[in-house]
Structure formats: structure tokens, C-alpha cells
Image: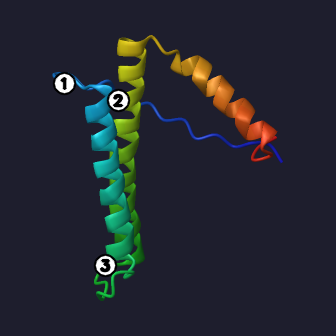
Amino acid sequence: METEYKAISLPKLNNLKPSLESTALKLMEEAGELAQAIGKFRGLNGESVKMSNKDVAEKISEELLDVAQVAVSMMFVLEDQYNISIDEKLKEHIEKLKKKGYIK
């Protein structure tokens, strides 16, 4: 079985002066919103859910993309402010996944 990839391309946001710390805090905020959407809209908080499964998945996907956007923003911060090569880090990450047996 061949490894499947999901490619995503998100923009560098304009008019922001993010730091590593502010971006990390924003990432945690967005991850919290994703967790809240999953918990609330899946009824894990004890409330009855009045949304269809499709609408729930739509809301979760919106929150997931917010998380992805902030993660990409943090990549730009690492490249711009710390001279980190995200391309090189991505190669290292893929190799780590292979060594752990997550992908072939």
C-alpha cells in the first residue's frame, strides 16, 4: 500500500507581526476551539446536538483549517525570524515517520 499525502497551501498573513510566542498561544487557542467544536457538536459535553453529522463535520473542518493556518504562520515565523528550513524539517519528519513504522 502506497503512502497517501494531503497537500495544503496556506498563505503568509499580511499586516501581522507574529512572534514565536504569540503564534504558539494562537495555535493553542485554535486547537481549543477545535476541541470545543468536537466535544460540543458531538454531544460529548452532555448537551443534545441539533446539527446534522454533515453540519458537524463542516464546523470541525472550519476549525481544523484555522489550526492549520496558525501552524503555517508559525512555520513562516520560524523561517523568517530563526532561519529554520521548513523544507528540511519536513524531510526529517517524513524520515521519522518511516522509522516509527507509521508510513512506508
Query: In terms of image quadrants, where is residue 7?
Result: top right
Residue at numbered disc 3: 51
Q: Amino acid at mark 3?
A: Met
Name the residue beneath numbered marker 2: 73
> Mark 1 near mark 2, Cβ–Cβ under 8 Å?
yes
Residue at 35% across, 38% down: 69
Residue 33: quadrant of the picture: bottom left
Say which element carries label 1.
loop
- Badge 2: how crowded within 10 Å, few (<14), some, or many (20+)? many
- 68 up-or-down from 35: above or below: above
Q: Residue furthest left?
A: 15
Residue 67 circle label: none
Is 87 drawn above or below residue 8 in the view shown? above
Residue 95 placement (x, y as % from top left): 74, 31
Real-space Cα separation, disc 1 to disc 2, in angstroms: 10 Å
Give the label on residue 16, or none: 1
Residue at mark 1 to residue at mark 3: CA–CA distance: 35 Å
Q: Residue at x 35, y 14 (%)?
A: 81
For mark 3, give the secondary structure: loop
Secondary structure under tag 2 reads: helix
Q: State which tag comes first along the sequence, 1 or 2.
A: 1
Q: Name the residue at 64% across, 40% down.
A: 5
Residue lying at the far front of the rendered structure: 21
Q: Residue at x 69, y 43 (%)?
A: 4
Viewer-nearest residue: 88 or 14? 88
